């Protein structure tokens, strides 16, 4: 069989991720704060871009009406992610373009409704962190410089709940070039700080620190913590009383005192360090309609620098092609950024409008009326790809008359009720939460009882599904929810 070399012409299609396509996809999936950061970074790197000061009476611009609509500046009618770079951008008459250019990035079309937005004080807050609280006490304790170094290392290795689990005493001693005894001494000092029980290495030590301070002479409590933590969790007080050789009433009284201790001393500071959300979009009710509007606060409105307009005009007909090519390259980058931002904002608006259409009952009546919805439903409704909808709804938040939610919250799997209608999983979770909230504290409902209660409400659901939803909601089992006192 002979072997030979030959040339062959072959035609094929290939999808290429151009820089412009990569930029469009990246901007689409950024959160609002990430987008602002990215735009400001681009303004630093691209001198052609500058921020337009907002006039007092700014007229919203839906399109670049005063800009020549070339392939590089006219938004796609599909508003979806572009499939490739357009060669026509290379043929733009930039001098003529800049003569007429005055449009900033798209602005909010419903600026008159801004008065109903939540105030700044509702989204921003500052509070003292756990480490700051402990370091203030270190500075007031009169420790030496070497002791403060050990204290800093201990505090720096506490987890979010105030436990010393990120490093051992031996590790800290090695880092501080100190003895283990010195570290143990400083650790004991920190454990006397507020909040009580801080810097413990496990739950048992945390509770004992608090007991030594609050109930130093109660030996039953100490024995229960040292020897019977599992029985305490199961509320098996009869077993504890038998093991300790004391009355059930004494064990019950001791358990009541233990229940008042704080198993997570750093929790109060963790609550203060909650993540504050600034919505990407607002939904306001106007009459019987729900109107979405983009949150443009803090978003730079971009325009082409006047200096570079004049510089490009001076280069017309000149011999310095390098300068002209540099300015034109930056102009292309600037217009792609403006176009990508417009495309992103337009897509968010379209997705939100579609969600309002599908979830109208939620906005009117609450979470119990949330309907099953998948990404494909919205994608088909607005004629976009499912992956585009997924990117748009990731890390984007919407402020509604019902509260602030991530856009992905409105997408739920379905559960069929006894009438044959579909319910959203979030609606079922809301029903479970309501049932548990109204159960008798001394006789909480088991998962099987919750199934029966849901069946009376017309919801057909398996016990294991109830258990899964209950755990997702952070609700304990009936044995652990039982109020013994």
Image: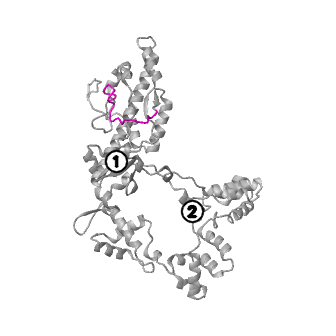
Secondary structure beneath dot 2 equals helix
Q: Position of residue 330 (x, y in %)?
A: 44, 25
Q: Earlier in the sequence, mark 1 or mark 2?
A: 2
| Residue 365, numbered circle | none
**Residue at the spot of label 2:** 268
Secondary structure beneath dot 1 equals strand
* Predominant SS along the magenta part: loop
Q: Quadrant of the N terminus?
A: top left
* Residue that sits furthest to the front in the current view: 57
Q: Position of residue 430 (x, y in %)?
A: 36, 65
Q: Which residues are magenta?
A: 53-73
Q: Are marks 1 and 2 in contact (CB under 8 Å)?
A: no
Q: Nearer the viewer, residue 347 or 99?
A: 99
Q: Position of residue 123 (x, y in %)?
A: 49, 52
Q: Is residue 157 visible?
A: no
198 part of magenta stretch: no
At a point 28% along the width and 25% down the height, the residue shown is: 4
Figure check: 233 above or below 388: below
| Residue 292, numbered circle | 1
As drawn, is 75 to the left or to the right of 399? left
Q: Position of residue 117 (x, y in %)?
A: 42, 50
Specify few, some or many for label 2: CA neighbours under 10 Å numbering under 14, 14-19, or 20 or more.
Answer: few
Q: Is residue 267 visible?
A: yes
């Amino acid at each position: 069989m002979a072997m030979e070399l030959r040339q062959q012409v072959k035609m094929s299609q290939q999808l290429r991720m151009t820089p412009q396509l990569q930029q469009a996809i990246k901007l689409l999936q950024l959160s609002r704060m990430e987008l602002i950061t990215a735009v400001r970074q681009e303004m630093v790197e691209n001198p052609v871009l500058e921020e337009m000061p907002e006039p007092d009476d700014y007229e919203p611009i839906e399109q670049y009406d005063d800009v020549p609509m070339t392939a590089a500046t006219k938004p796609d009618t599909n508003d979806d992610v572009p499939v490739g770079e357009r060669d026509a951008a290379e043929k733009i008459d930039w001098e003529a373009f800049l003569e007429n250019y005055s449009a900033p990035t798209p602005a909010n079309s419903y600026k008159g409704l801004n008065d109903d937005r939540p105030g700044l004080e509702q989204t921003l807050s500052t509070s003292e962190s756990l480490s700051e609280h402990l370091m203030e006490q270190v500075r007031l304790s009169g420790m030496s410089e070497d002791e403060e170094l050990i204290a800093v290392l201990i505090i720096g290795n506490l987890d979010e709940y105030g436990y010393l689990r990120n490093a051992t005493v031996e590790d800290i001693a090695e880092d501080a070039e100190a003895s283990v005894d010195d570290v143990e001494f400083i650790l004991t000092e920190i454990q006397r700080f507020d909040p009580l029980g801080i810097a413990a290495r496990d739950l048992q030590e945390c509770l004992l620190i608090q007991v030594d301070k609050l109930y130093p002479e109660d030996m039953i409590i100490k024995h229960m913590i040292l020897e019977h933590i599992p029985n305490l969790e199961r509320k098996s007080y009869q077993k504890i009383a038998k093991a300790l050789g004391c009355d059930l009433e004494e064990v019950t009284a001791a358990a009541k005192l233990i229940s008042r201790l704080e198993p997570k001393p750093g929790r109060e500071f963790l609550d203060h360090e909650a993540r504050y959300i600034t919505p990407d979009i607002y939904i306001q009710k106007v009459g019987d309609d729900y109107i979405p509007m983009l949150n443009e606060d803090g978003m730079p409105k971009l325009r082409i620098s006047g200096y570079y307009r004049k510089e490009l005009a001076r280069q017309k007909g000149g011999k310095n092609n390098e300068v002209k090519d540099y300015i034109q390259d930056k102009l292309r980058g600037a217009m792609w950024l403006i176009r990508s931002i417009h495309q992103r904002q337009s897509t968010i608006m379209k997705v939100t409008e579609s969600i309002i259409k599908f979830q109208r009952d939620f906005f009117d009546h609450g979470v119990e009326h949330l309907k099953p919805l998948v990404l494909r439903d919205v994608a088909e409704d607005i004629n976009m790809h499912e992956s585009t909808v997924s990117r748009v709804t990731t890390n984007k938040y919407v402020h509604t008359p019902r509260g602030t939610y991530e856009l992905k919250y409105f997408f739920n799997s379905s559960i069929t009720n006894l009438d044959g209608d579909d319910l959203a999983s979030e609606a079922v979770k809301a029903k479970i939460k309501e049932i548990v909230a109204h159960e008798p504290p001394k006789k909480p409902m088991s998962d099987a009882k919750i199934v029966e209660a849901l069946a009376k409400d017309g919801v057909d659901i398996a016990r294991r599904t109830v258990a899964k939803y209950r755990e997702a909601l952070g609700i304990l089992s009936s044995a652990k929810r039982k109020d013994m006192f």
